[in-house]
């Protein structure tokens, strides 16, 4: 009989899982408390894994790891400087004009909808009543200005960026040394081979995903910028860079981009319908990219459960704020690649991956218990091409047979 999700556990299973639960809680607390250290370290590790294939390619051309690391990180820093240069003028204008911009947005919304007018009148009447009551003077505390806030946070952010760049440079320059160390510390031949396969699989999936998504985001930013230019929007280059950066954040990034396009649209145009054109164009372009281009380009093997992606996004955003949103998907891909090759975590890989065909036993059970209209284990849930490609994916067991998900 196949070993299932709720298989019989040993007598000390409760103690075993209690210890794991305490460890997970302690790890989350440590990641939150020491995030100033962990964020740049995790970012540097992911960056080194993503860029390692490029370093190996340069190695085939006779360029050593140290020189390759210097060239790669110099290009990365140059790209960052170019992006900052392209958006610096527009960003400075938006930041300096932020109070006037928000007032103009509020006025435009009042003109378009008229919904805020009763609230404004009620607020004015309340202020008049308070002023006429002759009560004690109120003490008003001025909020911290945005420029003073930037002055305080810039050294902190710059320090984290520098730590990430330096650490990533050292990791790339070390070549495959850590793969060598990983093989040396494993106790037997089977563990040596398995650990090396897992590490290479994590690297391959991360680099494939990130480099492909980066190419897609460059094309997306170019198309969005061109669309905003055709619509007569100010600073179309800034729109393109924003679209490029936000598309690294699943789901939330596109929503933020649409809202930003809507805000700039109602500020730019006097006509109601024209003010809706920028967010509509942004939505059309982003939807075409998300529904057609990315699934085909990334491939079936890297498809993730949409619920798992959203939960990962929410968790890392809660833990590490905006930076966690960018890191959530790469961390999830690394976790999926690790669980794919680990039989003890086969159950986790099953929940993280996209839908795959059910075997005959699972199909019979689902059709016996579920309602007739269920789409679970439906024969048309995956196309034959998708099913064949998923069947070719690496198994989680050493002998090539795919075990049933189990918690042991």
Image: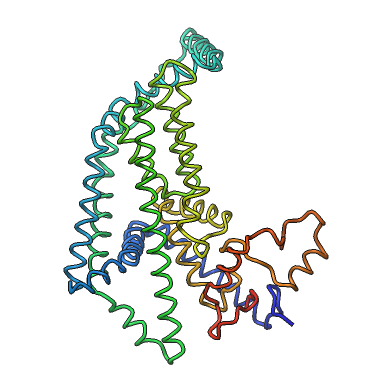
* Point 30% across, 64% down: residue: 51
Toward which corner of the image does residue 183 lie, by quadrant? bottom left
Q: Residue at the spot x=42%, y=25% of the render?
A: 265
Left or right: where does residue 69 sit relative to residue 35? left
Q: Residue furthest front?
A: 385
Determine the residue located farthest toward the top in the rendered image. 132
Q: Position of residue 156 (x, y in %)?
A: 27, 50
Is 78 rendered above or below residue 46? above
Q: Please name the residue shown 45% across and 35% down the image.
A: 282
Q: Quarter holding the C terminus?
A: bottom right
Number of numbered discs: 0
Residue 155 x/y as whole percent? 23, 48
Residue 370, position as x, y percentages in the image: 80, 60
Q: Is residue 222 left or right of residue 120?
A: left
Is residue 161 placed above or below 282 in the rendered structure?
below
Q: In x, y percent, where is residue 322?
A: 41, 47
- The answer to which of 193 and 140 lies nearer the viewer is 193
Query: To which quarter of the image does residue 235 belong?
Result: top left
Q: Between 45 and 362, which is closer to the camera in this rendering?
A: 362
Applied colour scheme: rainbow
- 242 lies above or below 191: above
* Image quarter in which the N terminus is found: bottom right
């Amino acid at each position: 009989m196949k070993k299932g999700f709720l298989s019989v556990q040993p007598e000390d299973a409760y103690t075993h899982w209690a210890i794991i639960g305490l460890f997970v809680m302690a790890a989350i607390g440590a990641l939150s408390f020491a995030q100033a250290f962990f964020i740049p370290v995790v970012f540097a590790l992911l960056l080194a894994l993503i860029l390692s294939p490029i370093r190996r390619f340069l190695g085939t051309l006779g360029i050593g790891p140290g020189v390759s690391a210097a060239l790669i990180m110099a290009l990365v820093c140059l790209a960052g400087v170019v992006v900052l240069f392209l958006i610096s003028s527009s960003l400075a204008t938006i930041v300096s004009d932020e109070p006037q911009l928000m007032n103009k947005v509020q006025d435009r919304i009042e003109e378009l909808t008229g919904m805020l007018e009763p609230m404004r009148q009620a607020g004015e009447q309340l202020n008049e009543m308070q002023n006429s009551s002759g009560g004690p003077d109120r003490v008003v505390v001025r909020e911290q200005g945005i420029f003073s806030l930037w002055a305080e946070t810039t050294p902190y952010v710059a320090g984290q960026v520098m730590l990430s760049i330096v650490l990533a440079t050292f990791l790339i320059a070390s070549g495959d040394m850590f793969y060598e160390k990983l093989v040396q510390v494993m106790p037997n031949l089977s563990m040596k081979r398995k650990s090396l396969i897992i590490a290479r699989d994590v690297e391959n999936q991360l680099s494939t995903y990130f480099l492909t998504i980066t190419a897609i985001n460059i094309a997306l930013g170019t198309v969005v910028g061109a669309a905003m230019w055709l619509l007569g929007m100010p600073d179309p280059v800034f729109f393109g860079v924003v679209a490029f950066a936000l598309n690294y954040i699943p789901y939330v990034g596109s929503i933020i981009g649409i809202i930003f396009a809507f805000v700039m649209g109602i500020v730019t145009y006097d006509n109601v319908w024209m003010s809706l054109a920028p967010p509509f164009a942004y939505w059309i372009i982003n939807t075409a990219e998300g529904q057609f281009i990315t699934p085909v380009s990334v491939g079936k093997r890297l498809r993730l459960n949409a619920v798992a992606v959203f939960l990962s996004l929410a968790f890392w955003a809660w833990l590490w704020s905006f930076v966690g949103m960018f890191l959530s998907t790469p961390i999830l891909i690394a976790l999926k690649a690790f669980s794919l090759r680990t039989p003890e975590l086969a159950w986790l890989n099953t929940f993280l991956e996209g839908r795959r065909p059910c075997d005959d036993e699972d199909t019979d059970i689902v059709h016996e218990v579920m309602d007739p209209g269920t789409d679970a284990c439906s024969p048309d849930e995956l196309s034959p091409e998708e099913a064949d490609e998923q069947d070719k994916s690496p198994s989680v067991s050493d002998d090539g047979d795919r075990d049933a998900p189990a918690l042991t």
